[in-house]
Image (tube, rainbow, N blue to C red):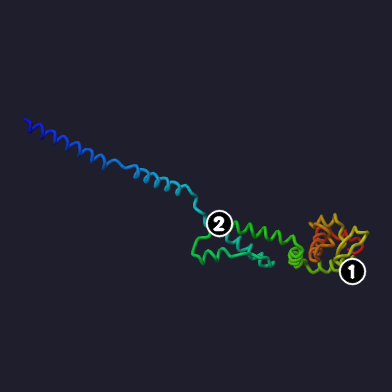
Amino acid sequence: MQKAVILLACACALLVAAASAAAVSVTPTQADTNSTQADTNTDATAASEPRARAAGDRLRTRYRLWRQKLERYGVWKGRNLIRAAASNDRALTARELRRSIRRMKRRFANWSRTYEGRATVHRFKVRHIPDWGREHLRSIAFCESRNNPRAIGGGGAYRGLYQFSFSTWRVVGGWGDPAAAPRSEQTWRAWLLLKNHGSGHWPVCG
């Protein structure tokens, strides 16, 4: 009887130990729980982050046109991002191109406000004046100022190659002193005045 009791007690102890071991093997540790949760959070963050959008053909064309414009006027255009991305074997993002286009626009705007920029920009524009317009403007310039872009007449009221008044100069988009503007700009704005408003500004020489 005593042996039976001892055997029964041993069997109960073995069952309790086996159950504890099974519970330990099934229940995850705190470290495993934290690791799984961290992986889940990482996956969720990666899924929520927006992917950089690749630059489309239209944006690439705008970028190339702005580079060509700056090159035509002799303005520094910076590094070619399309070529750099191709050499590095990576995709070019739309954000990169938009930022570069904004910089080129700002650079061109700042340059075009300088004397050199104004002279260069309007030198290109003057090429589009038709032959009859050039002949007419040449005769006006000789009559008004003897082809002197710094001429001042009428007690300071009329200024420059075509003897603009300040108010008329502003009408055709000019700013500052007409006599201080580049010759090419004076010629272009005189053409705008002649084309859009006729020769009434020059009652004698027009």
Element on which disc 2 rests: helix
Placement of the C terminus among the 4 image quadrants: bottom right
User: Residue 32: which quarter of the image?
Assistant: top left
* Residue most extreme to the top: 1
Residue 128 seen in the figure:
no
Q: CA distance from mark 2 to mark 1?
A: 54 Å
What residue do we see at 64% from left, 58% from top?
103
Above or below residue 178? Residue 7 is above
* Residue, far left: 1
Q: Locate residue 163, reporting x and y percent.
A: 88, 62
Q: Number of labelled discs?
A: 2
Q: Dot 2: within a 10 Å radius of its alpha carbon, few (fewer than 14), some, or many (20 or more) residues?
A: some
Q: Is residue 34 above or below residue 59?
A: above
Answer yes or no: is residue 17 visible: yes
* Snapshot quadrant of residue 34: top left
Q: Earlier in the sequence, mark 2 or mark 1?
A: 2
Quarter in which the N terminus is drawn? top left
* 35 relative position to 63: left or right: left
The residue closer to the viewer here, 39 or 115, is 39
Looking at the rendered structure, the kind of residue marked 1 is: Arg
Residue where numbered disc 2 is placed: 94
Front residue of 58/203: it is 58
Residue at the (75%, 62%) spot, across then down: 114
Three-letter residue code for mark 2: Ala
Provide the residue designation for mark 1: 146
- Within 10 Å of disc 1 (Cα), the crowding (few <14, some 14-19, many 20+) is some
